[in-house]
Amino acid sequence: MSLLMPEGTRLLHIGPAKTGTTSLQSGFHFNRDALEPHGVHYAGRGTQPRAAAGAVALGKRIAGHRSGVEAWPKLVEEVQGSTAKRVVISSETFARAGDAGARTVVDAFGVDRTHVVITMRPLVDMLSSSWQQFVQTGSVERYEAWLDRMLNSPDTVNGSQPEFWRKTRIDVLARRWGALVGAQHVTVVSLGGAPRDFVLRTFERFTGLPEGVLVPDPASDNVSLGFGVAETVRRFNELAKPMEGMTPDLQAALIEFGAVKHLRGAREALQADARIDVPQWAADRAAQLTREMNEGLRAAGVNVVGDLEALTVPSRQPVPAATTPADVSTEAGAQLMIGVMLAAGDGALPVLPRDQREAALAAVERLGTKDLVVATGRRIADRVARKVRRRQG
């Protein structure tokens, strides 16, 4: 079956997050020069136009980003002015748009030219990664409490936490966007039970690219945080939130674009941390919700690529009950602290020489997780206080 989109199509991939988006976006961005000879243009200047998507979907600047609402008209101008056979626009932030925001997007790209693509992976596989992502952006809610609130909500269609369910109820997304462009112009790609590169090969077929062109940047893999690191960050959020001057922008700079970004550059530190498992009760509830979403998709009449039934099967075995977070590894703890200090110093601190780094690791090894959090918090408090004084004086 041919999946090739007609010439002139604006292929709008709206995610949602945690469905292979980082790999896909990196594949398009990393290989821009290889796309153009095949008549494919990837919109935006970075791996994804997140600021523009946030402007139209949320009506605001996303914390930690310099660009705000002015980014959206720039993206629209780029898409409308492209002479490529097919234009690809991809950002999981589009999935957070309500009815009005979605209509604005479709009107800008053209109702008769826009084809919406939604990627979908097993809901059970998205739970732990979604929780740790919320923690990175400032949440203080513990893992099992978050699971209980998300999965046992009586209304997951609208959701007790709109940001989660608005971008995760795939059937609702399909109906919202299908009402604007027509069900025949909405395609859901199921990644359940599929090979790791399935999403890349599928988008090559959508756009007429030769197989193998979309190869992600090896350094772009969005590895999820382990339990110890995620719980350390969550505890930091608790300690830092009441501090004077701790704005969402500063939290994003210190954690998402500071500590976590630095930590991801040290892969061995992430690999040493215990993973976040899904308890059996949550896996059972996720399977039930997935079956509901599958029924909704079939009723909506949208296109489906891949196996919907495979979405009810977790990629790894659930555990009987949620576990207690493990202590963060020495290496991960040290890298987190260094990342935070570099961010707090606006990148001005020098990289530690090997002998000093080894001494720092040895010192951190003598600290438990709670002590590590306190030590990190004190360093942050000092940095924040100095920033506030500079702003005031």
Image (tube, rainbow, N blue to C red):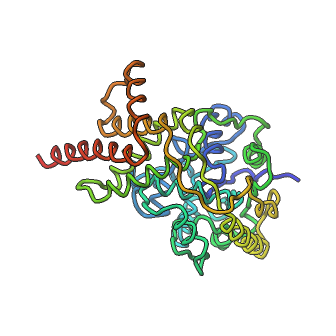
In this view, 46 is above or below 10: above
Q: Estimate the x, y position of residue 72 in percent, counting from the top left.
A: 46, 55
Within the image, what quadrant is residue 240 found in?
A: bottom left
Residue 364's image quarter?
A: top left
Q: Point out the residue furthest to the front here.
A: 366
Q: Is residue 392 left or right of residue 277?
A: left
Front residue of this view, candidates 342 and 230: 230
> Can the viewer see residue 117?
no
Task: Decide which of 346, 33 is in the foreground and name it.
Answer: 346
Farthest residue, direction left: 393
Residue 24, quarter of the rendered image: top right
**Which residue occupies 85% across, 52% down?**
2
Q: Residue at x 46, y 36 (%)?
A: 262
Please tell me which residue is depicted at 64% across the width and 58% down the height of the picture. 126
**Residue 202: x and y, percent?**
77, 48
The image shows residue 238, relative to residue 203, as above or below, that is below
- Give the residue displayed 19% in from the left and 43% down from the top: 386
